[in-house]
Image: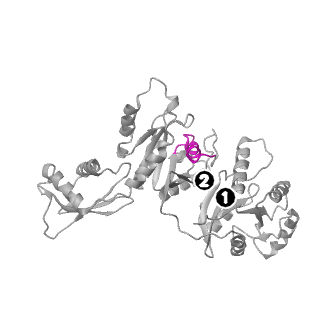
Amino acid sequence: MKQTPVVAIVGRPNVGKSTLFNRILRQRRAVVDNDAGTTRDRNYATTTWNGRSFALVDTGGWVPNTEVRIERAIKNQVEMAVEEADLVLFLVDATSGILGLDAEIAALLRRSSRKTLLAVNKVDDQGREALSHEFLRLGLGEPAAISAMAGRNIGDLLDEIVSHLPEGEATEEDEDVIKVAVLGRPNVGKSSLINALAGAEKVIVDETPGTTRDATDTLFEHDGQRFLFIDTAGLRRRVQIRSNVEYYATLRTARSLNRCDVAVIICDAVEGITHQDLTIASQAKEAFKGVVLIVNKWDLVGEQAQIPDDYVQWVHERLPFLYFAPVLFTSMVTKLRVQKTLEIVRRVAEERKRRISTSQLNTFLEGLFSTHPPPSANGRSVSIQYATQQGVEPPTFVFFCNRPRLIDDNYKRFLERKLRDTFGFEGVPLRFHFRERKRSHQAIGGS
């Protein structure tokens, strides 16, 4: 199968790269803000135009000669994106004309071996068309005059883009890819985990909390299995969201959770489980995603800390609604047990697809109800007549009862624990539906 071609959008800060990225995708995937430098990591997404599929990469503002640490990191990310790209889309701003930084970037692109298209943004109407002619001086050919905000001439630009791409295939998102959202508070090691697993510096790692703002996709293969890791902005409490960019980054995190199969939630071994961790974990559970709990910075805990078995129990006591989730103790610094993450994620993803036959399920229930039938309520008998698994991802079970409203939450939790004891479902929230069945049916459990 041919690889999907890659198109990287590059340019100096605040020329509209993320706006164009969102416009081409026809959805708001990248954080957009008037502050320069909002986009930091490479942000990947696949789109299709006229039957041609390609991966689009949004990059941070390119500052070639800088001594500012975060700007150097952005520069490195952009250069890596250009190296990976089949086509570079160089975006400039019609309203500012050619700036020195534009000329520097153009010179670097002319020296590179990458095919480059020049697009002049913010040409919002016919009257601004003449502004694009100045950019011929950059030596990158005839510029495309567009408006990413208004959508002007975007179709023509896409026609030009696909005409320069190597042959690829328009495919839907592959079913054999396990999609993993990496969640956690700022500065707990989310980007470091992805870099360690991917074996390369795929996302920026910085000690400053909040370095990652967008949800950033990293695709790689391990032991024959492909993984798509979604690095997310550190979730902050709502009262800490001081700016538009942090607000939208939090929305991206929620959307990343919706996209994933498995949520990897990273906690800090030194600080323990915080209220914010509880909120993140609760969101993953409510979304019915597979869950893996990682306790990072284990190398900093010291000799007086609880041994891991005791700590697992403590973690589950703090997160009782995720008692079924596996817990892994890691150190991104020493790489302690980091590679086990992929093994556990893969196992949880498989459990999320587990299907129990109706006969197996009802044999299990018959044995359970013989010793622990549903309790009666208000003097009225309660029976579960039979059950079936309705679906997977998440595993969904339907229980047909004579009086479903009288089955209390304690018994539902008991039923779930016993089902897990018998069939597994490690790391996977289960969805239960209790429905009334009025027709006469041989009950397998009741009182």
Question: Of the residues tagged 1 and 2, which is closer to the observer?
Answer: 1
At label 2, counting other C-alpha atoms closer than 10 Å, the crowd grade (few under 14, some 14-19, many 20 or more) is many
At label 1, counting other C-alpha atoms closer than 10 Å, the crowd grade (few under 14, some 14-19, many 20 or more) is many
Q: Nearer the viewer, residue 409 or 117?
A: 117
Q: Is residue 136 magenta?
A: no
User: Is 6 above or below relative to 428?
Assistant: below
Proximity of marks 1 and 2: CB atoms separated by less than 8 Å = yes
Q: Report how far apart the C-alphas of labels 1 and 2 lie in the structure.
A: 10 Å
Q: Quadrant of the N terminus?
A: bottom right
Say what secondary structure mark 2 lies in: loop
Q: Please, what is the three-letter code of the amino acid marked with disc 1?
A: Asp
Q: Residue at x 55, y 69 (%)?
A: 171
Q: Earlier in the sequence, mark 1 or mark 2?
A: 1
Given the current orientation, which residue lies at the most extreme top position? 304
Q: Is residue 196 magenta?
A: yes
Return the x and y of residue 302 as percentages of the image width and height.
49, 25
Residue that numbered label 2 is attached to = 214
Q: Which residues are magenta?
A: 184-200
Return the x and y of residue 363 as percentages of the image width and height.
19, 57
Image mark for residue 58: 1
Q: Quadrant of the C terminus?
A: bottom left
Image mark for residue 321: none
Q: Residue at x 81, y 64 (%)?
A: 95
User: Is 438 above or below relative to 380?
Assistant: below
User: Is 155 above or below relative to 46?
Assistant: below
Any part of residue 36 in sight: no
